[in-house]
Amino acid sequence: MTLEVEVNGRVRSIAVTPLGTAGAAGGRFQLLVDGVAYEVSAKPTDLGLSLLFAPSGRVVDAAVTPLRGGEWLVQLPHVNVTALVDGRSRPRGGERAGAGEGAQRVLAPMPGRVVRVLVKAGDDVALRQGLIVVEAMKMENELGSPKAGRVKEIAVAEGASVEAGRLLVVVE
């Protein structure tokens, strides 16, 4: 499987190859990140994956939340990234016109608390521009605009607790 991961505007290609048998209980994998190989053991957790890097023995827990358009929010210690699975076969950015037609609803990807609202109703926003920051699992997650447009509605206030799937912002 190939993933494209964008961090701060830089796209990285990651190839994941099973080493032996992999299944629902996890397995061993080789990750090829921009040409550099890593060997990891992965196990599913309630929120995503626990990764053990060989030979260093470093363990990293990652919360994984599906978004729209084949994208995933991956929350790692001290950083959140948006990953697009096999992005070479899916249109990205402005080419994704079908995903941006009409009003788009930004929903809470998991339960948490609204820390900051970065825009107000009537603001013009760019694709992926930060709209709202939700704290979940002691990490702040900035949720971006699914399209370029205008903020139609802010459905929550700072400090509000939100459940997964709750409407946060509408962009038209």
Image (spheres, rainbow, N blue to C red):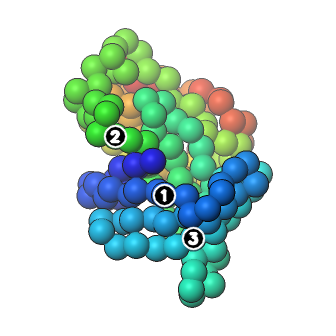
Q: Furthest residue to the bottom?
A: 56
**Label 2 near label 3: C-beta < 8 Å?**
no
Secondary structure category for the residue under label 2 = helix
| Quarter of the rendering containing residue 26 | bottom right
Label whose residue precedes the other's in the sequence (2 or 1) = 1
- In the rendered structure, the answer to whether residue 9 lies left or right of residue 32 reads left
Q: Furthest residue to the top?
A: 102
The residue where tag 1 is placed is 17
Q: Nearer the viewer, residue 163 or 97?
A: 97
The residue where tag 3 is placed is 40
Relative vertical location of residue 42 with respect to residue 39 in this rendering, above or below:
above
Distance, label 3 to label 1, CA atoms, is 10 Å
* Residue occupying the point 43% across, 42% down: 85
Q: Is residue 120 visible?
A: no
Of the residues shown, which amino acid type is indicated by label 2? Gly
For the residue carrying disc 3, how many other residues have a C-alpha within 10 Å: few (<14), some (14-19), or many (20+)? many
Label whose residue precedes the other's in the sequence (3 or 2) = 3
Secondary structure category for the residue under label 1 = strand
Q: Nearer the viewer, residue 30 or 160?
A: 30
Relative vertical location of residue 131 with respect to residue 40 in this rendering, above or below:
above
Q: Nearer the viewer, residue 144 or 39?
A: 39
- In the rendered structure, the answer to whether residue 149 lies left or right of residue 108 reads left
Relative vertical location of residue 2 with respect to residue 167 in this rendering, above or below:
below
Of the residues shown, which amino acid type is indicated by label 1? Thr
Question: Could you tell me residue 129's position as x and y percent?
Answer: 33, 42
**Label 1 near label 2: C-beta < 8 Å?**
no
Label whose residue precedes the other's in the sequence (3 or 1) = 1
The residue where tag 2 is placed is 87
